[in-house]
Image: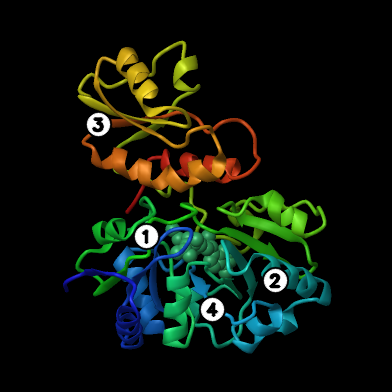
């Protein structure tokens, strides 16, 4: 199959809607990362998603909706969730979050209805749902007339795509079309939040909506992290595997930022070129410093001008992908700056997972 990158015109969006309705998958721009979209309520389309990504079916998908006026009531009208399983207090919080953050990079884990195929949720009684903020994503969902499942459009465990060209590299020949919605504005995935039966709020995956923004919307209520722990019963976030978002090139995180390093890391003798990821500052200066420090050819990327975490997040996967593709034998990354404010926490999660050697796929 030939994979074509399409400008998002009215005609190309209609074409993609038809392709989706006939069971094909589409590369979909969102404000976070590009998704691999298929019909959320059709098990055959879902099966294709898992196959195209080589993703294990134990890793559940996110259902993407396009509500006219985002609210819990509008979501219930879509018949994707089972409101009987939610207390009034939980509904109140969920409604607040939906009204405040949708469309946007917030995914909510809610009790699923029987309409949602078990394949979408890996057999869990809950379904993850979000309303993306990218106009092309919303237009496409509306043109199809039913929700779409869309995991990040990368091969399982690999670097998430933030441009149409990235998607083509990951899925060439496996999908007919990729809608080109430009570079992703956020750059890392949505934040996943669970509001449980007792209306307690947990974060299952930090992402491009900062936790303090969600806490502020809940009158300062503290959100706890829910880590993956199979000994505590069913997995609440099976996708939170240790290794993820990983480049093919080995990635090592340095102990300190480049200009504060006192000892150099051990670099294999055979290495010819190293990629260097710095967090902030002028690229030319970072290049000069790296060239002076290492006896190797270096390729340097800087994530931001001044350490602003939204900018760092926006550039993170792109920089990692470029370093992965530059022919380096090793990538060295500065650690994410201290602190948990803004997107630093989510960035630390992504860098940690990217630097754990992948066991499979
Ligand atoms: O920003 C995003 O969320 C992107 C764009 C394309 O929308 N999508 C994305 O999907 O990141 P994906 O498939 O890469 O991540 C889905 C993750 C799963 O790995 C799992 O951690 C969590 O969502 N998830 C899905 N359903 C769940 C459920 N019922 N309970 C707990 N976690 C769930
Ligand atoms: Mg993913």
Closer to the chain start, of discs 3 and 4, is: 4
- Pointer 3: what residue? 329
Mark closer to the observer (3, 4): 4
| Residue at 33% from the left image edge and 23% from the top image edge | 287
Q: What is the spatial separation of the Cα atoms under label 1 and label 2, in whole angstroms?
A: 26 Å
Q: In what element is the residue under mark 2?
A: helix
Nearer to me, 185 or 193? 185
Quarter of the image for residue 250 reads: top left
Nearer to me, 30 or 358? 30
- Pointer 1: what residue? 182
Taking the image as shown, residue 91 lies to the left or right of residue 52, namely right
Q: Residues within 10 Å of mark 4 (few under 14, many from 20)?
A: many
Closer to the chain start, of discs 1 and 2, is: 2
Taking the image as shown, residue 269 lies to the left or right of residue 148, namely left
Circle 3/circle 4 CB separation < 8 Å: no
Circle 1/circle 4 CB separation < 8 Å: no
Q: What is the spatial separation of the Cα atoms under label 3 and label 4, in whole angstroms?
A: 43 Å
| Residue at 58% from the left image edge and 40% from the top image edge | 344
Q: In what element is the residue under mark 1?
A: loop
Circle 3/circle 2 CB separation < 8 Å: no
Residue 213: give x, y in percent of width and height: 70, 53
Q: In what element is the residue under mark 3?
A: loop
Closer to the chain start, of discs 2 and 4, is: 4
In this view of the protein, can residue 349 be seen by the observer?
Answer: no
For the N terminus, the image quarter is bottom left
- Pointer 2: what residue? 99
| Residue at 24% from the left image edge and 57% from the top image edge | 169
Mark closer to the observer (1, 2): 1
| Residue at 42% from the left image edge and 79% from the top image edge | 140
Q: What is the spatial separation of the Cα atoms under label 1 and label 4, in whole angstroms?
A: 20 Å
- Pointer 4: what residue? 66
Q: In what element is the residue under mark 4?
A: loop
């Amino acid at each position: 199959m030939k994979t074509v990158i399409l400008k998002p015109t009215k005609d190309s969006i209609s074409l993609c809607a038809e392709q989706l309705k006939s069971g094909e998958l589409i590369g979909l721009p969102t404000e976070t990362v590009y998704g691999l979209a298929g019909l959320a309520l059709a098990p055959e389309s879902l099966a294709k998603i898992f196959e195209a990504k080589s993703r294990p079916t134990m890793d559940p998908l996110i259902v993407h909706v396009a509500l006219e006026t985002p609210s819990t009531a509008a979501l219930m009208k879509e018949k994707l969730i089972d409101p009987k399983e939610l207390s009034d207090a939980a509904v109140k919080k969920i409604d607040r979050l939906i009204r405040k953050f949708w469309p946007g990079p917030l995914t909510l884990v809610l009790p699923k209805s029987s309409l949602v195929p078990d394949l979408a949720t890996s057999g869990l009684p809950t379904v993850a749902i979000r309303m993306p903020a990218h106009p092309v994503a919303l237009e496409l969902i509306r043109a199809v007339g039913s929700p779409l499942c869309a995991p990040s459009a990368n091969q399982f465990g690999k670097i998430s795509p933030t441009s149409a060209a990235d998607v083509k590299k990951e899925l060439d020949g496996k999908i007919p079309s990729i809608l080109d919605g430009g570079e992703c504005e956020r750059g890392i995935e949505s934040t996943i939040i669970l509001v449980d039966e007792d209306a307690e709020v947990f974060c299952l995956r930090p992402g491009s909506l900062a936790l303090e923004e969600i806490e502020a919307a809940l009158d300062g209520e503290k959100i706890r992290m829910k880590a993956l722990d199979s000994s505590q019963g069913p997995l609440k976030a099976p996708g939170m595997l240790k290794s993820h978002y990983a480049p093919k090139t080995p990635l090592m995180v340095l102990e300190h930022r480049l200009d504060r390093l006192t000892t150099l890391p051990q670099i294999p003798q055979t290495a010819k070129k190293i990629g260097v990821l710095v967090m902030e500052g002028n690229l030319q200066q970072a290049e000069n410093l790296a060239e002076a420090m290492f006896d190797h050819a270096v390729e340097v990327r800087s994530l931001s001008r001044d350490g602003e975490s939204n900018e760092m997040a926006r550039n993170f996967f792109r920089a990692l992908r470029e370093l992965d593709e530059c022919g380096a034998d090793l990538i060295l990354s500065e650690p994410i700056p201290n602190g948990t404010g803004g997107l630093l926490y989510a960035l630390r999660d992504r860098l940690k997972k990217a630097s754990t050697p992948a066991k499979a796929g």
